[in-house]
Image (spheres, grey):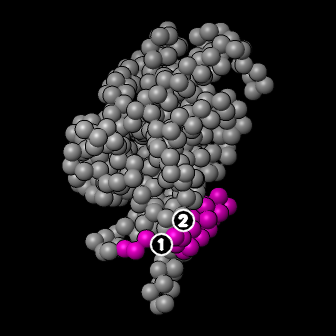
Amino acid sequence: MNNHKTHDADYTNMPVDKKGRKSNLSMFMVMLGFTFFSASMWVGQQLASGLTWSQFLWAILLGGAILAAYTGALGWIGAESGLTLDMLARKSFGSKGSWLPSAMISFTQTGWFGVGLAMFAIPVAKEIMGLEVTPDSMPWEGYLLVFVAGILMTASAYYGIKSLTIVSYIAVPAVAILGTVAMILAISRGDAGLVAQFAKGTKDLGIIAGAGLVVGSFVSGGTATPNFTRFAKNAKVGLLITVVAFFLGNSLMFLFGAVSSIYAGGNDIFEVMLNLNLFYLAVLVLGLNIWTTNDNALYTAGLGLSNIFGLSKKTMVIISGIIGTLASVWLYWNFCDWLNVLNCTLPPVGIILILHYFTHRGKEEKETVVNWSAVIGVVAGAVVANLVHWGFASINGMIVASICWGLGQLISKKN
């Protein structure tokens, strides 16, 4: 009886056993919901402005392939090991060295959780409630929306993977179906076809730059993939579901953003639905879209902080939710650029986890306190990713991190 009470359904500090594994459909819904990220629609808007229709498709395919390779490898590792990102980091960074990646991902995911709350509350306050919202002021009704949404999203993240699965089962079909219908309606009411409409504008981006935006849109969040795929039936399922979900989910978000931009001049499908007089459906789609990603973000932050402070995941989810909710509006207006800078720090973490896992697979390891080559690799990779404006920022960071880590491995073997 006591064992039942103390069982951790989220397997915070242990591998997920066979009993804890989820169905393939449940995993697909969770991973697809993870990629339903409203900020990706903003990227779709940028792609539509700078690319023709064919270039847009090529950019999505190229960027999606890179993103799928990175997240797919992490998906395999999570499913095969049954371990969280933070438990994997303990092996590759050391018991205390893992605090660095845990802190980085917790900070960014809490930040994006707060931004997500404001991304829901501010448009609803402005468009539905008719309130005037500026960077300097927002009426109390807007803050009330933030507060209520923060409580609901924190509560579902608090209850862990079971709650995330339920939310995803509701949100994923609703967002996909309603968003697609709204997109088709917008195209049908336009005065030009999709290809012709895409041809308008500056078209000064280029396929490589567009693919860079696609990769950058979710490469940081994708680093947390093992936190979810560890519940998959096996490694092949974890890989396949991750690749398909990232391709499908991200492509839909880019399409929603692109179409809303070229036909309605808005930022996302929310504004398209408003223009189509689908007010309540617009609020529903916006809320569900943000809810799925915010839940995953807060869940990840809770796991990361639990690794650092040794407190339960549930406790850290509540603390992260409170911080994200209180700072939400300020984060939205002041911190988005900083969060994008921090996004570049996470791919170096992911590539070191991948390299360490596959080079030490099946070997007995003695846990170190700090693996300095991994720590230095992340710091150096993050600096290069932010300062070198050539190619793909995230890949530049991963290459540098891999070199630093690899040199450290060679030196340690000689000693």
Main secondary structure type of the part rendered in magenta: helix
Give residue 255's quadrant in the image: top left
Circle 1 — which element?
loop
Picture layout, residue 92 above or below residue 212: below
The one of 397 and 43 positioned closer to us in this rendering: 397
The one of 6 and 209 positioned closer to us in this rendering: 6
Q: N-terminal of the two: label 1 or label 2?
A: 2
- Rate crowding at label 2 as few (under 14), some (14 to 19) or many (20 or more) other CA atoms within 10 Å: many
Point out the stretch of residues depicted in magenta: 365-389
Residue 4 pos. (x, y %) = 27, 39
- On residue 267, the disc is none
Q: Are marks 1 and 2 in contact (CB under 8 Å)?
A: yes
Direction from residue 367 to residue 147 in the image, left or right: right
**Does the magenta portion include 383?**
yes
Q: Could you tell me which residue is drawn at 26 percent across and 47 percent down?
A: 232
Residue 229 pos. (x, y %) = 33, 48
Picture layout, residue 246 above or below residue 378: above
Q: What residue type is labelled 1?
A: Thr
**Which residue does the numbered mark 1 point to in the structure image?**
368
Give residue 328's quadrant in the image: top right
The one of 360 and 335 positioned closer to us in this rendering: 360
Q: Residue furthest right?
A: 136
Give the quadrant of the N terminus: top left
Q: How many labels does the image show?
A: 2
- On residue 97, the disc is 2
